[in-house]
Image (cartoon, grey):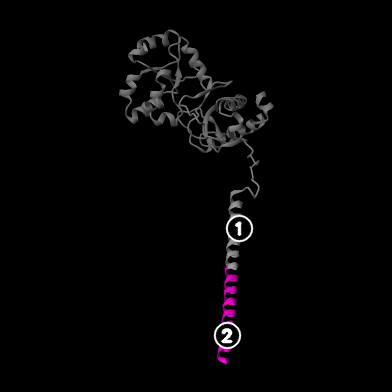
């Protein structure tokens, strides 16, 4: 929070005003809408707009630590799913993974083998159900490059791309807890990214602190840092996006001198060519006049000679 205040980029008061406005909007909407049987905890989204598209987009998300985790496995009734690599060279079986998860009390509800993902979840409806059945997905980092094709677009749309876990190491629980305490920043092939930064069930102060932590984390992660950030906006799923930060346009445009400007040079060349053409036309007219004068003089001389010969 101090870092944001010192940098002067985003004021904590601005974030607080935006959070208050969104909470008021949600209260007004809840009074007009019909109550749902199962109330869902709505998320707040931080939208970052970049000036330039990242040159090296990646499938894996950047982890941005948050002071208040969105998912706390110890208290939240969250459902986690892990995809393991069951190929012969991996040296890991579903039974071995399940035993480790149970013995170390790792918060994983479901273990799916890569071979099962290829066969049982090929239809679109099966992929959609899998995506909606769990709050978060993890996967062996060795199979991460294979997952976009196997999981389909639904996982990307709902920002549920599996978080890579190094299953060769023994600290599975520590890696999963770290991922739960982080916001996921996906820098893909566009200039706009959306990050989950808070929940309506949190306190206002907790949401503000999460937003500021995410802003600082994004500024440290994106290429060129603050120099590549165009804007930050905060929104709920169905609300308007409220501005938190807008970069000042760079007005220092490089205006070339008129003589050096390509269009000026072209105009100058055209003017010179026009002058040359006019001079050529004028000179040709003068030559024609001279010829006419000479021909007139010649005819007079001839007439005089004829008169002399006749008189003689």
- Give the image quarter of residue 300: bottom right
Q: Which residue is mark 1?
A: 272
**Magenta span covers which residues?**
284-312
The quarter of the image holding the N terminus is: top right
Q: Which mark is residue 305?
A: 2
Q: Position of residue 53 (x, y in %)?
A: 52, 34
Note whether residue 140 is visible: no
Q: Position of residue 298 (x, y in %)?
A: 57, 79
Q: Closest to the observer: 242 or 288?
A: 288
- Give the image quarter of residue 255: top right
Q: Give the class, few, some or many, for how many residues have Cα within 10 Å of label 1's Cα (few <14, many ≥20).
A: few
Q: Which mark is residue 127?
A: none
Q: Closest to the observer: 201 or 123?
A: 123
Q: Position of residue 224 (x, y in %)?
A: 58, 29
> Dots 2 and 1: beta carbons under 8 Å?
no
| Most distant residue in the left direction | 119
């Amino acid at each position: 929070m101090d870092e944001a205040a010192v940098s002067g980029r985003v004021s904590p008061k601005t974030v607080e005003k935006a959070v208050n406005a969104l909470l008021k909007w949600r209260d007004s909407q809840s009074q007009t809408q019909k109550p749902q049987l199962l109330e869902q905890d709505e998320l707040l989204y931080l939208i970052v707009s970049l000036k330039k598209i990242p040159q090296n987009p990646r499938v894996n998300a950047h982890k941005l630590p948050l002071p208040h985790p969105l998912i706390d496995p110890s208290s939240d009734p969250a459902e986690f799913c892990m995809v393991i690599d069951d190929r012969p060279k991996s040296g890991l079986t579903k039974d071995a993974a399940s035993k480790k998860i149970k013995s170390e009390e790792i918060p994983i509800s479901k273990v799916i083998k890569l071979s099962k993902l290829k066969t049982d979840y090929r239809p679109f409806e099966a992929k959609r159900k899998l995506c909606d059945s769990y709050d978060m997905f993890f996967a062996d980092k060795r199979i991460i490059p294979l997952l976009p094709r196997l999981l389909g677009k639904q996982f990307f749309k709902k920002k549920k791309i599996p978080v890579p876990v190094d299953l060769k190491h023994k600290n599975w629980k520590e890696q999963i807890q770290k991922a739960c305490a982080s916001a996921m920043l996906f820098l893909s092939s566009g200039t706009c990214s959306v990050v989950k930064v808070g929940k309506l069930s949190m306190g206002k102060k907790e949401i503000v602190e999460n937003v500021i932590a995410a802003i600082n984390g994004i500024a440290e992660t994106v290429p060129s840092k603050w120099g590549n950030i165009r804007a930050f906006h905060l929104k709920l799923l169905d609300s308007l996006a409220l501005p938190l930060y807008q970069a000042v346009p760079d007005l220092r445009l490089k205006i070339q001198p008129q003589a050096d400007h390509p269009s000026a040079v072209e105009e100058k060349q055209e003017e010179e060519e026009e002058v040359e053409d006019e001079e050529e036309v004028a000179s040709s007219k003068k030559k024609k006049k001279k010829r006419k004068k000479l021909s007139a003089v010649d005819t007079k001389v001839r007439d005089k000679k004829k008169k002399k010969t006749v008189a003689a």
